[in-house]
Image (cartoon, helix red, strand yellow):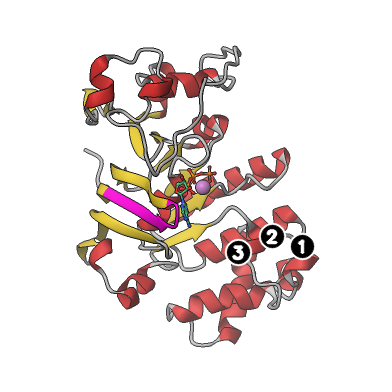
């Protein structure tokens, strides 16, 4: 039996905007197992980033976590991350649970050299005695993220580095404290294809080296097939399907998952028939009742408009939230 490191239950986040309450994610539940790469996929705006940020209470106003639990199995035992004080969660965030965000420009401060930035992240978590010691360690970290000439690069400012190098530095800041869980939100989107592949290889290598668990957020299904162990598919703020990469790619159950796979060259079946899913993602202020996918679903039945489908296990570890099953 795989051992969970995170158990997310009924996680719900709303944004209180002038236009109305945006129900960004609604009763999202999933487990992440120790040592795996767990991917969150879905179209833009479906709630991937909000889900991953809510795990450590990283939701800013006008957003609020309105319900749910995030049980984290730390070395000291299980703890509900949503019940921790701001101070307590800060000790975990950036330390045991670290993030790598999409945009290296936004993640790095242009005013400080990269050595200082890596060292600072270690200092706030008490991993080093002073910045000087941290800068020395930063050289090793830069080396481990395959930055050439790290002794020299450690003194560089972000603008002196290429996009790929900057994203390596961001990964360096993410892994500096040897996190148990690394959350990578579209870590390669801003990069060109060859650099993307290098960065993904790097995340895989680091995961193996440090026995970390990775939560990978992407809308690139090719990346998922290559790097993930299990996948959760999100649609309009809900998880519609969870399974192993093989289950999802070879035997997708949810009509939305099938649609997603038809919209890209399927890396497993090699079918290259490209069809976009008709229709658009619903407005989350007044999401459709019942199954949120029903207005776009070719198989929608009367019940789909009335009743929210629960996630149920169809085969070993393969869950779907759909009235067809
Ligand atoms: N600050 C905010 N104010 C209002 N609504 C927000 C805010 N931040 C996010 N949302 C809403 O939450 C929903 C989920 O957004 P989220 O960023 O999680 O999507 P995503 O799946 O990560 O998309 P992408 O692939 O584009 O990154 C969206 O409908 C978005 O409009
Ligand atoms: Ni996002």
Q: Which residue: 65% across, 72% down?
A: 109
Foreground disc of the pair 3, 1: 3
Q: Quadrant of residue 148?
A: bottom right
Q: Secondary structure at mark 3?
A: helix
Q: Which residue is mark 2?
A: 166
Q: Position of residue 267 (x, y in %)?
A: 55, 21
Please tell me which residue lies in front, 213 or 144.
213
Q: Relative to 132, say whether 56 is above or below.
A: above
Q: Earlier in the sequence, mark 2 or mark 3?
A: 3
Foreground disc of the pair 2, 3: 3
- How many residues crowd mark 1 within 10 Å: few (<14), some (14–19), many (20+)? some
Q: Which residue is mark 3?
A: 107
Label 3 vs label 1: CA separation? 14 Å
**Figure quadrant of the N terminus:** top left
Q: Kindly identify which numbered label has been placed on residue 161.
A: 1
Q: Which residue: 60% across, 64% down?
A: 107
Q: Secondary structure at mark 1?
A: loop
For this view, does 109 lie left or right of residue 203? Answer: right
Q: Which residue: 23% across, 19% down?
A: 303
Residue 14 counted in the magenta span: yes
Q: Position of residue 89 (x, y in %)?
A: 33, 70
Q: Earlier in the sequence, mark 1 or mark 2?
A: 1
**Figure quadrant of the C terminus:** top left
Asked if labels 2 and 1 touch by Cβ distance under 8 angstroms, the answer is: yes
Residue at the farthest right position: 160
**Mark 3: is the Cβ under 8 angstroms from ligand 2?**
no
Magenta stretch?
A: 11-19
Q: Relative to 21, say whether 169 is above or below.
A: below
Label 1 vs label 2: CA separation? 6 Å
Q: Relative to 260, say whether 154 is above or below.
A: below
């Amino acid at each position: 039996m795989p051992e969970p490191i995170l158990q997310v239950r009924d996680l719900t986040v709303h944004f209180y905007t002038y236009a109305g309450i945006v129900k960004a994610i609604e009763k999202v539940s999933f487990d992440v197992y120790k040592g795996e790469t767990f991917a969150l996929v879905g179209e833009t705006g479906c709630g991937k980033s909000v889900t991953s940020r809510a795990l450590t209470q990283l939701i800013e106003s006008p957003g609020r976590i309105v319900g749910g639990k995030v049980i984290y199995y730390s070395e000291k035992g299980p703890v509900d991350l949503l019940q921790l004080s701001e101070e307590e969660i800060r000790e975990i965030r950036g330390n045991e649970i670290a993030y790598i965000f999409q945009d290296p420009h936004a993640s790095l401060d242009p005013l400080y050299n990269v050595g200082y930035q890596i060292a600072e992240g270690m200092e706030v978590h008490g991993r080093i005695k002073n910045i000087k010691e941290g800068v020395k360690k930063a050289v090793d970290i830069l080396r481990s993220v395959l930055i050439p000439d790290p002794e020299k690069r450690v003194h560089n400012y972000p603008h002196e580095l290429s996009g790929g190098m900057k994203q390596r530095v961001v990964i360096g800041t993410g892994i500096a404290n040897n996190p148990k869980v690394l959350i990578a939100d579209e870590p390669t989107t801003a990069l060109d294809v060859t650099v993307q592949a290098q960065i993904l290889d790097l995340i895989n290598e680091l995961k193996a080296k440090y026995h970390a668990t990775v939560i990978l957020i992407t809308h690139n299904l090719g990346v998922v097939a290559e790097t993930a162990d299990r996948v959760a598919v999100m649609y309009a703020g809900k998880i519609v399907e969870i399974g192993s990469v093989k289950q999802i790619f070879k035997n997708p159950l949810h009509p939305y998952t099938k649609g997603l796979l038809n919209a890209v060259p399927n890396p497993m079946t090699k079918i290259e028939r490209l069809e976009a899913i008709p229709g658009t993602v619903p407005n989350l202020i007044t999401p459709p009742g019942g199954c949120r996918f029903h207005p776009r679903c070719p198989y929608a039945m009367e019940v789909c408009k009335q009743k929210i489908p629960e996630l149920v296990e169809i085969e070993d570890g393969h869950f779907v939230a759909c009235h067809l099953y």
